[in-house]
């Protein structure tokens, strides 16, 4: 009888694979095209060989990345191209696990261009959780995510969660590998790639930059709010999806009155119609315009007057933090709209589709010089920005001009704790109303837009999404016809 094999004590290495989402199937089309089917939609992915389609069928259960990711054979390149196209459309996920057991971790991309990378880690490296990382319950699983990460990690093995919690304090990889439930270097490397874990040197504090000085000024809840309430860096439903329509009745448009005797203000201050002020008239006439007259687009002169009246720097002044003359020098500006702490952190970027006297393109408004500075962007990026605005407004045609309101976040968070992002959004609201009033005064049309894509803006400007990013959008142009007041 053969003696029982001794346990070497070595753990089996987990395999990183990619697989289709449950509701997605692949179909071979006549002529060699492959289509992805989901939710009654058929999406063409291009033409591939029969051998590539046969290998791609394994994406249903999981195809190891190592079998095609770095291969030089033509079939490997085909499969890689197919998987990349699926990834770009958010139709795949990645699993880390052993072939004969369930998933250890499922990696769900949150940005279209996410691709798992495994940076090299050594025993001497010290890792710690990012202060922006958090773990929460979703259904009956725990998910680990961060507003900085391009993917979230669904934790399928509770032992891994325990190890991750221990990384709230810096740990050397050499020490981690001695633990019984060590999850493996691949998982740690994937988390480093997603900036959920980061390397620290001995003696480093845990608050600072995490590789980017702009992060020093961010509180956890502010960065999370910014990333999850905009498009571009998460895969959650966004916008008017009416998620509770089948569960809860809508609230009434006007709040039910409080009990008690009313004081009728109409009797206290009767105002004849002819005595209504110009400001009050503009506020009452303000409305959203979603359709624009492209036969008579807005002119450069009208745009210049609009920007001059709403956002131009009117004056600059300087002071010191310490009224006695010490401390850093602080610079302030005066502009037409109010801003918390006179921060005036908002910047305007214009995506111009049609404007008489101004070429189509993307511009930054220099509020100090009252000038437009062109920014070179790809035509498909400009198109995507304008089409997204049209979709958000529920119309087919793009606005003549789309104003993106961006924030230099550090301008506010350098001074304010806990309320910095809330103050920025309040400033956006004040500027939006200023836009509406001036558009009405100039006989132009305007419409505030509730969504913006922070990842697309970052690609167009080269700015990190947490350094300067969009916090609002406003469509501007000449209205096609009178709109119902709303």
Image: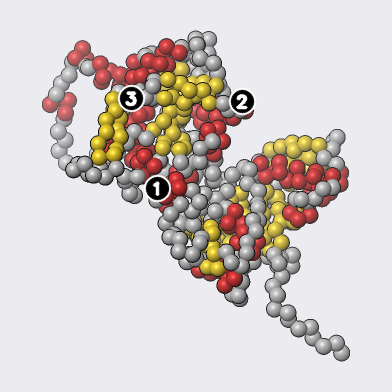
Q: Report whether 307 appears left or right of 14.
A: left
Return the x and y of residue 353 as percentages of the image width and height.
54, 19
Decide which of tag 3 and tag 1 comes sooner along the chain. Answer: 1
- In the picture, the quarter occupied by the N terminus is bottom right
Decide which of tag 2 and tag 3 comes sooner along the chain. Answer: 3
Q: Nearer the viewer, residue 3 or 236?
A: 3
State the residue at coordinates (46%, 41%): 467
Residue positioned most to the bottom: 1
Q: Select label 2 or label 1 by which is in front.
A: 1
Query: Pointer 2: residues within 10 angstroms few (<14), some, or many (20+)?
Result: few
State the residue at coordinates (56%, 36%): 459
Query: Pointer 3: residues within 10 angstroms few (<14), some, or many (20+)?
Result: some
Distance of label 3 from label 1 (alpha carbons) = 25 Å
Which residue has dot 1 on it?
217
Q: Find residue 459 and name its label.
A: none
| Number of dots carrying numbers | 3
Q: Nearer the viewer, residue 255 or 350?
A: 350
Which residue has dot 2 on it?
379
Return the x and y of residue 327 as percentages of the image width and height.
26, 45
Q: Select label 2 or label 3 by which is in front.
A: 3
Which residue has dot 3 on it?
313
Say which element carries label 2.
helix
Quarter of the image for residue 343 reads top left
State the residue at coordinates (61%, 49%): 109
State the residue at coordinates (27%, 30%): 317
Distance of label 2 from label 1 (alpha carbons) = 34 Å
């Amino acid at each position: 009888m053969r003696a029982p094999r001794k346990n070497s004590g070595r753990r089996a290495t987990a395999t990183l694979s990619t697989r289709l989402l449950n509701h997605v199937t692949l179909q071979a089309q006549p002529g060699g095209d492959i289509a992805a089917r989901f939710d009654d939609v058929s999406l063409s992915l291009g033409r591939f060989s029969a051998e590539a389609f046969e290998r791609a069928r394994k994406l249903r259960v999981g195809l190891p990345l190592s079998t095609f990711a770095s291969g030089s054979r033509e079939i490997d390149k085909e499969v890689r191209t197919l998987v990349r196209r699926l990834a770009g459309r958010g139709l795949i996920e990645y699993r880390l696990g052993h072939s004969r057991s369930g998933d250890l971790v499922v990696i769900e991309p949150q940005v279209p261009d996410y691709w798992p990378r495994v940076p090299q880690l050594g025993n001497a490296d010290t890792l710690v959780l990012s202060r922006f990382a958090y773990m929460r319950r979703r259904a009956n699983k725990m998910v680990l995510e961060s507003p900085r990460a391009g993917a979230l990690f669904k934790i399928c093995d509770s032992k891994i969660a325990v190890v991750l919690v221990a990384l709230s304090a810096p740990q050397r990889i050499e020490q981690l590998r001695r633990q019984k439930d060590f999850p493996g270097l691949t998982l740690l490397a994937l988390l480093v790639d997603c900036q959920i874990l980061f390397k620290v040197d001995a003696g480093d504090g845990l608050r600072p930059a995490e590789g980017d000085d702009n992060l020093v000024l961010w509180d956890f809840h502010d960065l999370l709010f910014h990333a999850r309430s905009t498009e571009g860096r998460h895969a959650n439903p966004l916008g008017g999806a009416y998620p509770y329509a089948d569960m809860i009745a809508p609230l009434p448009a006007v709040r039910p009155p409080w009990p008690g005797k009313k004081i009728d203000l109409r009797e206290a201050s009767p105002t004849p119609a002819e005595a209504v002020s110009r400001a009050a008239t503009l506020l009452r006439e303000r409305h959203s315009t979603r359709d624009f007259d492209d036969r008579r687009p807005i002119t450069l002169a009208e745009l210049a007057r609009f920007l001059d009246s709403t956002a131009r720097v009117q004056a600059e002044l300087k002071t010191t933090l310490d009224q006695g003359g010490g401390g850093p020098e602080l610079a302030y500006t005066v502009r037409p709209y109010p801003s918390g702490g006179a921060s005036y952190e908002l910047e305007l970027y214009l995506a111009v589709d049609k404007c008489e006297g101004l070429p189509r393109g993307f511009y930054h408004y220099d509020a100090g010089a009252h000038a437009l500075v062109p920014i070179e962007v790809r035509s498909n990026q400009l198109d995507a920005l304008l089409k997204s605005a049209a979709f958000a407004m529920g119309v087919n045609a793009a606005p003549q001009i789309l104003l993106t309101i961006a924030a230099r976040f550090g301008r506010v968070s350098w001074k304010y704790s806990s309320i910095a992002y809330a103050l920025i959004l309040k400033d956006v609201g004040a500027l939006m109303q200023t836009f509406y009033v001036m558009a009405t005064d100039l006989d132009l049309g305007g419409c505030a837009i509730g969504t913006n894509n922070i990842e697309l803006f970052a690609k167009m400007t080269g700015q990190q999404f947490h350094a300067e990013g969009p916090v609002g959008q406003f469509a501007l142009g000449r209205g096609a016809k009178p709109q119902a007041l709303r």
